[in-house]
Image (cartoon, helix red, strand yellow):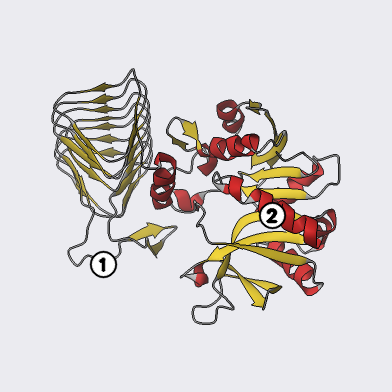
Amino acid sequence: MIKNSYQVVVLAGGASSRFFPFNTDGKAVFRLMGRPLVWYTLNGLSKLGIESATVVRPKENAELENVTGPKIGQLKVNYVSQEKPKGQADAILTAYKNIKNPDPALILNFQHFTAASIIPKVLNLFEKSGKSVLVSTKTDKPWKYGILNIDGKKVTGVVEKPQKGSEPSNQRIVGIYLLTPEAIKMIASRPENEYQLEDGLNELASQDKLVHLQIDKPLASVKYPWDLFAIKDMLLDGKQYIDKSAFVHKSAIIEGPCWIGPNAVVGAFCLLRKGVILEEGVQAERYLEIKNSIIGNNSHVHSGFIGDSVIGQNCRIGAGFITANRRFDRRDILVEVKGEKVDSGTSSLGVFVGNSVHIGIHCGAMPGTIIESGATVMPGEIKRGIVRVER
């Protein structure tokens, strides 16, 4: 059990723009298996015996407090608002302004619900070294992340998204820190910019006041909507759960792990395979195959094929809807994100459908298609790229 001699801060702010079309309420509020993502991290902290935590949320997202509540287990949850999405440094400083005691701060991103086994090691390293600690893990794509510059075991600096081929190491920062009050002040003293946190960490490293804990187990990352698949699999953990209020027709087939929520319906001759989550009130009618997908609260899908896809809440999808999830050449699927083509890192990817979308009969979507919340797809249409609401 960990006593609260540390301030605990969970970062759940940011604009979430790369999480489109599920960015309206913020990534931390996205529901999986009946809970918002941030709940799993807070619950993990509670199980460690931590008694209080401060959650930094966007100013406009009061919904976060409503869905998580003021207490999870024995953990009391306080909320502070980040005025604007200025980055992690601003979020950390926003939290620290609202903390009365200048104790060292354990800081983690909202998606680190598997961090319970790591946090004691972080605290132990801090107790032994007396220095600020950050956690790192190996990556085969170091040009996409904040990367450590290491000399032996010594941290000499941090490089944000280094140029491909000139990476100082393969150790990426995962978003778990133990920062001393001195480190917080050092970060606050740096010029306000996108990389203020990294500037502060570099200053700490230059004074030999920063150490790192290398872990082998990968941690969840939530930057793009397809990152939800890895989180889904972590939460399912190979198990099947069917709520007692759900209805599963006797002719339906369920292969592998699944989570079928309250009042969900799995109709006649449906097939669920390779990890499926059907949230509360979902209706999967007849002759519908769902593979490795998530369908949000109260969405209704008549028939067809949904593969490697995420469907939002309160959607109505007509008969014969087909998601194409592979390219002819089986290459990785590119997805348009903020006007640029981003490699999803997988050759199996379907469609991302926002909330309250209506799709007519006999429609389809090409791999990597994104449909904005509130959009309508007329019968017989095949969509690709980004489908916007007509304005």
Closer-to-camera residue (203/21): 203
Residue 83 picture quarter: top right
Residues 184 and 211: in front is: 211
Q: Which mark is residue 351?
A: none
- Name the residue type under label 2: Val
Q: Residue furthest bottom?
A: 166
Identity of the amino acid at label 1? Arg
Q: Is residue 243 above or below residue 334?
A: above
On the image, numbered disc 1 is attached to which residue?
A: 331
Q: Are marks 1 and 2 in contact (CB under 8 Å)?
A: no
Mark 1 vs 2, N-terminal side: 2
Q: Residue at x 46, y 70 (%)?
A: 140
Secondary element under disc 1, as helix, strand or loop, is loop
Neighbours of disc 1 within 10 Å: few (<14), some (14-19), many (20+):
few
Name the residue carrying label 2.
122
Q: Tell me the residue at 64%/39% (across/down).
A: 45
Give how far across and how far down residue 182 sits, in percent. 85, 58
Q: Residues within 10 Å of mark 2 (few under 14, many from 20)?
A: many
Residue 247 in the image, given as x and y percentages of width and height: 26, 21
Q: Is residue 112 left or right of residue 318?
A: right
**Relative vertical location of residue 267 with respect to residue 157 in this rendering, above or below:** above
Left or right of residue 49, residue 117 in this image: left
At a point 34% along the width and 23% down the height, the residue shown is 281
- Whether residue 187 is visible here, answered yes or no, is no
Element on which disc 2 rests? helix
x then y, percent, for residue 165: 49, 82
